[in-house]
C-alpha cells in the first residue's frame, strides 16, 4: 500500500507533526516510515536495535510493521519499553505478551529482550535490562503518548528528563492506571498493578529516530499539552519537541485541540 499523505504537516520546535484523516492512514504512514528507518540502517551496515510500545493505540502501527517490508528481520534486535510488576507471565495484559502476539511472534527477529515482570529483584532486573540497552545505540523507538502525557510509564510524578537510570521501578499514577481500564486491559481499577518497570525519558530520547503514534479523542488533551504547553515533566511527551529526529503521527480526533 502506498504511504498515505497527511492532511496537515506542521513543526513545533524540532518536532514534525503529521495529521491524518483517520487512524488507519495514520498507522499505515507510521509503519511505512518505521520500516524505512530499519531498512536504511541495514543498508548502512547496522544491525538495527528498536524499542516498541505495547498499547491498543499502537495496533495499526504494529500491524503495518508485521507485514515485514524489506527489512531483514533476523538482524533486528528488539526491546520493549515497560512492564507491570507482579502479573503472571502469561497474563494478556503483560506488555511482553502483547508484543509477542502483535509483532515479536510474527517476524523472525534476531533477538527480543523481555523485561521480567515476575522478578523477585526489580532493581536487579532494571540494571540487567539497562545494560542490554547500553550495549549499542538504539536506532528506533516506536512510542505513544498516554492520557496524562506519559511516554512508557514515565508519568508526570516520576518523569525526569535528567534521569541517571535507563530503567527504573515506578509507582503508576491514578490517571495512568485508569487509562488501562479505559483501554479494556483490566476490568476495574483495583485489577491494575500499582508498580511497573519503565525505560526512563533519557533512555527513550537517546534513540536516533522516534516514531510516535497517538490516535483517538482521549489523547487530544495530552497532545495539546505536549505541543502547546511548556517543555516540562508535567507533560513528559513535551520533550519530543527537543528531539532532532522525531515525528508525531496524529489522527483528526487526537489533533482536535491543536487544529
Image (cartoon, rainbow, N blue to C red):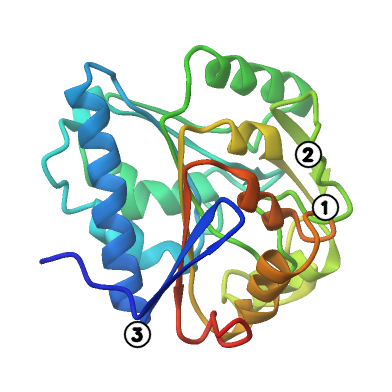
Quadrant, the C terminus:
bottom right
The first of marks 3 and 1 along the sequence is 3
Q: What x and y, as percent, mark residue 81?
A: 57, 41
The first of marks 3 and 2 along the sequence is 3
The first of marks 1 and 2 along the sequence is 2
In the rendering, which numbered label is found on residue 233?
Answer: 1
Tell me, yes or no, if residue 244 can be seen here.
yes
Looking at the rendered structure, the number of numbered marks drawn on it comes to 3
Spatial separation of the CA atoms under disc 1 and disc 2: 7 Å
Residue 143 is left or right of residue 241, and the answer is left
Question: Label 2 near label 1: C-beta < 8 Å?
Answer: yes
Q: Nearer the viewer, residue 177 or 46?
A: 46
Residue occupied by mark 3? 21
Residue at 58% of width from left, 75% of height from top?
183
Spatial separation of the CA atoms under disc 3 and disc 2: 33 Å
Residue at 58% of width from left, 31% of height from top?
206
| Secondary structure state at the residue bearing disc 1 | loop
Residue at 46% of width from left, 85% of height from top?
252
Q: What x and y, as percent, mark residue 73?
A: 20, 32
Residue 155's image quarter? bottom right
Residue 93's image quarter? bottom right
Instruction: Establish if 145 lies above or below 24.
Output: above
Q: Nearer the viewer, residue 81 or 226?
A: 226
Residue 121 is left or right of residue 133, and the answer is right
Q: Residues within 10 Å of mark 2 (few under 14, many from 20)?
A: some
Q: What x and y, as percent, mark residue 4?
A: 22, 71
Amino acid at each position: 500500500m502506498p504511504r498515505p499523505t497527511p492532511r496537515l504537516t506542521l513543526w513545533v520546535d524540532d518536532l514534525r507533526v503529521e495529521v491524518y484523516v483517520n487512524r488507519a492512514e495514520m498507522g499505515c504512514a507510521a509503519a511505512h516510515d518505521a520500516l524505512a528507518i530499519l531498512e536504511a540502517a541495514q543498508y548502512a551496515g547496522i544491525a538495527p536495535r528498536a524499542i516498541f510500545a505495547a498499547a491498543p493505540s499502537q495496533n495499526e502501527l504494529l500491524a503495518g510493521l508485521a507485514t515485514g517490508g524489506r527489512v531483514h528481520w533476523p538482524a533486528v534486535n528488539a526491546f520493549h519499553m515497560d512492564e507491570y510488576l507482579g502479573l503472571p507471565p502469561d497474563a494478556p495484559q503483560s506488555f511482553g505478551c502483547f508484543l509477542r502476539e502483535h509483532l515479536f511472534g510474527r517476524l523472525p527477529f534476531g533477538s527480543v529482550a523481555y523485561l521480567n515482570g515476575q522478578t523477585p529483584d526489580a532493581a536487579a532486573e532494571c540494571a540487567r535490562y539497562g545494560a542490554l540497552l547500553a550495549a549499542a545505540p538504539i536506532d528506533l523507538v516506536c512510542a505513544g503518548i498516554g492520557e496524562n502525557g506519559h511516554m512508557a510509564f514515565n508519568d508526570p510524578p516520576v518523569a525526569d528528563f535528567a534521569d541517571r537510570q535507563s530503567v527504573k521501578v515506578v509507582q503508576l499514577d491514578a490517571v495512568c492506571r485508569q487509562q488501562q481500564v479505559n483501554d479494556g486491559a483490566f476490568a476495574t481499577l483495583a485489577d491494575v498493578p500499582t508498580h511497573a518497570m519503565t525505560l526512563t525519558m533519557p533512555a527513550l530520547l537517546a534513540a536516533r529516530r522516534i516514531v510516535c503514534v497517538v490516535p483517538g479523542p482521549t489523547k487530544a488533551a495530552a497532545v495539546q499539552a505536549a505541543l502547546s504547553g511548556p517543555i516540562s515533566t508535567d507533560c513528559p511527551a513535551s520533550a519530543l519537541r527537543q528531539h532532532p529526529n522525531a515525528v508525531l503521527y496524529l489522527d483528526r480526533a487526537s489533533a482536535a485541540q491543536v487544529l
